[in-house]
Structures are given as structure tokens and as C-alpha cells.
Amino acid sequence: MTVTTPHTAYWEGVRDGLPFILVVAPFALLFGVVATEAGLNVWETLAFSVVVIAGAAQFTALQLMQENAPTVIVLASALAVNLRMAMYSASLTPHLGAAPLWQRALAAYMMVDQSYACSILAYERNRDWSPLQKMAFYFGAVTPVIPVWYAMTVAGALIGSSMPAGLALDFAVPITFIAMIAPALRTLAHKAAATASVVLALGFAFVPFNLGLIIAGIGGMMVGAQVELWMERRARA
Amino acid sequence: MTDPIIAKGTLWTVIILLGLGSFALRFAFLGLIGNRPMPDWIMRHLRYTAVAVLPGLVAPLVVWPNATDGVLDLPRLAAALTTLAVGYKTKNVLAAIFSGAGMLYLLLYLMG
């Protein structure tokens, strides 16, 4: 049996994280372009990506600010999109909870979908790993992703200011979001939640301050949870 | 995009508060709550946040696009449906984006 040191665990993480560059790079590039189109300069765009590091939430906030939604609604909607991070955090705690506070804080700052997914899979494969090895793997997995996130945001912002009009960039955000949601529609409950969200958002579009989106979000979550309960009851019966 | 002006004060407020809020969500359990389990009903709702919020955000943009002053537009609708179908079938985000963008540009070109 090979002995895994924190050093090798780190490099194993880097190797597992590398393919995600292909996902993160175009997404960051697109954010840079869209943010510039919305009137942000390069520094503002980079600050957005460095401070928040959450593509979907950043696009959400940007879109709602362009619609002149009240700041409270912008924040509530973007944070709702990021609520899944609380789930990731909960699910990583048994593995990383024993690490020093500064490491946990750093891990929290760099928590993205991809690093979470590949770390939790690695922990399930390597149940004998110590907390130190697990943390080393985690930092390895984010090493290729986070710098690319920053750099490609800047690249997008620099390209964005020289983008010709007529590229229909208004539709970059909807297409990106749909592409992210579609693979997530795994179960009947997910599909029901998404459908309820669409119906409620269109039905309540007349409500001021973009509150229709909040109604759609809460309604979609309730429908998802209820359908899940119903499916469980049916599976047991 | 129509008149994209975001006030600088609003922008920085959103960047800073969204950054703090996102960090709080990421740090909540890992840093503060520890190993105590969450109530089932909260986890059951949290599982659906992304699929409950993002479709609601996108639906009005697809049905009433800004670029056409809110008039339903065939290229944009077809692009959205293509993205959804390819993303659902392949589970591949990039393939879905490129298919949707391809459909959008093809129809915009054909319809002049």
C-alpha cells in the first residue's frame, strides 16, 4: 500500500482539479465581458470576482442591478443562489472540521462547486486520510481553479470593452444559466422545483422591486421539498 | 443591453455585502456550527435553492428579452430551448452553452 503524505495528497488534488479549468475559464471570461457591457471597469470587475468567487451569484447580482432592482433584492437573490454553499460547508465539516481555524476560513473562501465535488469524492475513496491530508487535497484541488477565475475575469473585462455590438450578448446570461440548471434537473423533485419557479416568476412578474423572483424562489424550494417527501412516501409504500 | 448604468455606490455595496454574505454561507458549518446535524426539513429545502432561483431569474429574460423591448423573439426562445435540451441530455455545461449560442447566431443570421 502506498503511503499518502500531505504533500502527495496536495498534488493529487491539483491533478483532480486541473480539468475544471476548462469549465471555469470560459465562465470567468464571460463574466468579465458581461460586467464590462454593464458599465463596470476592469478593477470593479476583478474586485467582484475576487471578493465573491461565485459565478452564478455574480451574474444574478449583475443582472438585477441592471434592472435597477433594490439592493436588498439584489443581495437576497444572489445569496439565495449561493445557499448551496452552506450545504457544501455542512457536508465538508466532518472531513475538515478538525483543521485549524485559519485553514477552515481559507477553505471556506475558496469553496466552489468544482472543488467541493472533487474533494468529497476523494474523501469517500480515501477513508483512511487524516484531516491534514484531506485539507492538503482540498487546497490542491482549488490551486488550478482560483487563479484562472481571477485571470480570466480580467481577460474578459479587457476583451469586453472592445466587443463589437450586435453579438446579442444580452442573451449570454440566460444561456449560461440554463446550461448550468439543465444538468441539475436530476430528479422529479428538481424538475418540479424548476417548473414551479418558471411559472411563479412569469406569473408574478408584475410585482414591484423584483419580488416576483423571491416568490418564485421560495415557491420553487417548497415544491421541490414536497415532491421529494411524496417520492419518499411512494418508494416506501 | 439597454442603457446599462449601475450606480457606483450600489455596485460597491453589493460587491462587499455579497462577498461577506457568501463567505458567511461557506463558513457557517465548517467554521462555526461543527458536526451538529441540520434539521431534515431545512436540508430538504436547501437542496432545491439553485433549481428554484435560477429558472425564475431566467424565464422573464427568455420570454420578454430586453434586446427586443420585451417582445417574444424566435431566435432567443429557440436558443434557450436548445441549451436546455442539450444540457439535460449531455449533462455538459459547455456543450449546452455552445449549442445555444450556435442556435441563436444561426437564427439571427437566417432571419436577418
Image (cartoon, grey):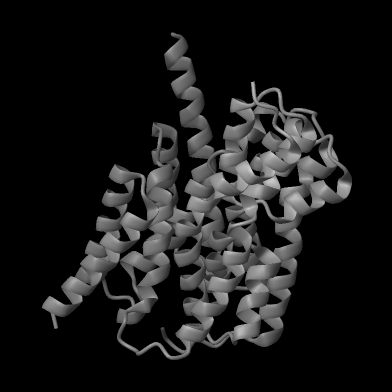
Q: Position of residue A42 (x, y in %)?
A: 60, 85
Q: Position of residue B47 (x, y in %)?
A: 56, 38
Looking at the picture, does residue A114 appear above or below residue A67? Answer: above
Q: Nearer the viewer, residue A6 or A165?
A: A6
- Relative to residue B53, is residue B11 drawn left or right? right
Image quadrant assignment for residue A137? top right
Judge whether residue A153 can be spotted in this image.
Answer: yes
Number of marks in the rendered image: 0
Question: Could you tell me which quadrant the C terminus of chain B lies in?
Answer: bottom left
Image quadrant assignment for residue A75? bottom right
Judge whether residue A83 can be spotted in this image.
Answer: no
Question: Could you tell me which quadrant the N terminus of chain B lies in?
Answer: bottom left
Point out the residue furthest to the top here: A237
- Relative to residue A94, is residue B40 drawn left or right? left
Q: Nearer the viewer, residue A214 or A149?
A: A149
Residue positioned 50% across, 58% down in the render: A21
- Relative to residue A221, is residue A43 drawn left or right? right
Point out the residue furthest to the left here: B110
Q: Position of residue B62 (x, y in %)?
A: 34, 65
Residue positioned 57% across, 41% down in the render: A118
- Relative to residue A203, is residue A120 drawn left or right? right
Residue positioned 42% across, 16% down in the render: A234
Looking at the picture, does residue B96 appear above or below residue A6? Answer: below
Residue positioned 68% across, 39% down in the render: A9
Q: Position of residue A58 (x, y in %)?
A: 58, 66
Q: Nearer the viewer, residue A38 or A31?
A: A31
